[in-house]
Amino acid sequence: MHGIRQMLRALRRTGAVLALAALATALAAVHTAAAAIVNIERDIQNLLAVVENPDLPLERKVEALRLLHTIVTLHYGEAHEYALSVRLGYGMALVEVGRPAEGEPLLRRALQDYGDRLGADHATTVLATHHLAAALAGLRRLAEAETLFRRALAGRERLFGSAHVDTLTTLGALADLRRVQGDLTEAETLQRRALEGLRTRMGPAHVTTLNAVNNLALVHRDQARFAEASALLEPALRIAETAYGPDSPVTLTILNTHAMMLARLGRAAEAEPMFRHVLDVRERRLGPNHPDTAGALNNLATHLAEMDRSEEAEPLLRRTLTQMEIIRGPEHPETIIVRANLAEALVRLGRQAEAEPFFDRVIGTLERDGAADGGDLALNLYRRSMLRGGLGQWPAAEADARRAVALAEANLGSGHYITIRALIAFGMALAAQGNAAAGIDQFERSIAAMRQSTPSDHPDRQRLMAGYAILLLNQGRPDAALPLLRDAAEGQIERAARRAGTERWAKDETDRSRWIHQTRVRAAWELAQLGTRRGNTP
């Protein structure tokens, strides 16, 4: 017993991993000689004090919670109130550090036990419901997560009212889930409600409020409303820097999101130093093998790939993938995202055959883990469809695109960008195999959805309009192609004007504008040849 107390004191003083390991060994011996334990309650309190130490990093608190959970369960039994409480806290902590697969069974057990003991409407049962939903969201089991978040929200509204911080926290979590699910209209409505409530209750400088601003900006990103997102983030960034410093976690989170918005607004020269700053701070403070550091490296590499610098992005993504496989495991949702990003970079480099096995593994993992209720599986099926089309494997491309369309429409809605892209891939695959009429039907569905959901100057809309026009021209229908090209050209004018002054984008915009203009000229000429020109000026 004296030895256990010594190790607990060492743990409180240093948090050393060696002390934790030694404690675990000693506890096993204590369990086999239970009669010798006379003061274990005191030892539990000592370990609990370690867990509550504000200076202890969260990852090390999780280890202390694991030991506390073992001790309490052995001493009191699994059904004891204390064991239930520690089980719930341990599960919550595992989800917070990005280990939802380990936290989910603990939280599910806690929810069952508290529901049986206290009832479904008790505050602790509702707390367990909220955190189980968060674990399921982390595992991309989105439909089940939505059900539980809505249940937790209703429970907290009954218990605390709509303006309580706990209610607003659940409201914001549900909003972010709805964003991932593709219902951007509801996501925006819920996130605005959460943000307004947090500003009133917590103030504009509270970390929770600033994170809600960041989450609303992510909704605007997915809506292609990049200027609005940037306008939200700029004052939030100033507040965070003043209140918490330029290198605080909340400041870095907002800075990273702001960099994404600037990149999409054509201000890549401003965005890249922001991505690099976030990476530099996290490497210095957390070390190279921390998941937040790997996430920052992934964000920088993805930015470089999107800026047509995939030759620089590839080694960074390979490094990130290696780190994430070690830190999170090879099948963790965050690891899967990095693997897919690497495959995309290889496609951009023209190395489709090398990219295909990466997509195969990503899709296989998502299928095995039951991720079909989110957009991840549909997105990567679309990507593999485009890759296979590029390799001339059109039947396989069609099969992937058909599945992507079905999944995206069922789970994300007809206006989601993944649905629209999957429809385009499906149309291309059908047309390439000689079924032009069916291919045109898919393009027309995607055009209708995009006109409803996407601004006129969005690059996806311009590419779709111009690509569909080419298909129509090749089918001898220049009269139908010309309005599409006019739409694409007008959007291109808006886009080029907004991005004026950025050197890298200037060439990209000039090339795209020239291509659209040349295709419009071709369409107008073919109309004249057919004698069906209606007085429109190309």
Image: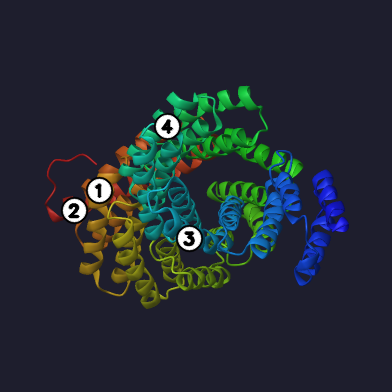
The image quadrant where one finds the C terminus is top left
At label 3, the amino acid type is Asp
* Kind of element beneath mark 2: helix
Callout 1–callout 2 Cβ contact below 8 Å? yes
Q: Is residue 287 visible?
A: no
Q: Earlier in the sequence, mark 2 or mark 4?
A: 4
At label 2, the amino acid type is Ala
* Local crowd size for mark 1, using a 10 Å CA cut-off: few (<14), some (14–19), many (≥20): many
Q: Position of residue 261 (x, y in %)?
A: 49, 37
Query: Distance between the Cα atoms at labels 2 and 3?
Result: 63 Å
Query: Distance between the Cα atoms at labels 1 and 2?
Result: 7 Å
The image quadrant where one finds the N terminus is bottom right
Query: Distance between the Cα atoms at labels 3 and 1?
Result: 60 Å
Q: How is the image coloured?
A: rainbow
Please tell me which residue lies in front, 176 or 346. Answer: 176
At label 1, the amino acid type is Leu
* Kind of element beneath mark 4: helix
The residue indicated by pointer 2 is 480
373 relative to 177, above or below: below
Q: Nearer the viewer, mark 2 or mark 3?
A: 3
The dot on residue 195 is 4
Callout 2–callout 3 Cβ contact below 8 Å? no
The dot on residue 484 is 1
The dot on residue 113 is 3
* Kind of element beneath mark 3: helix
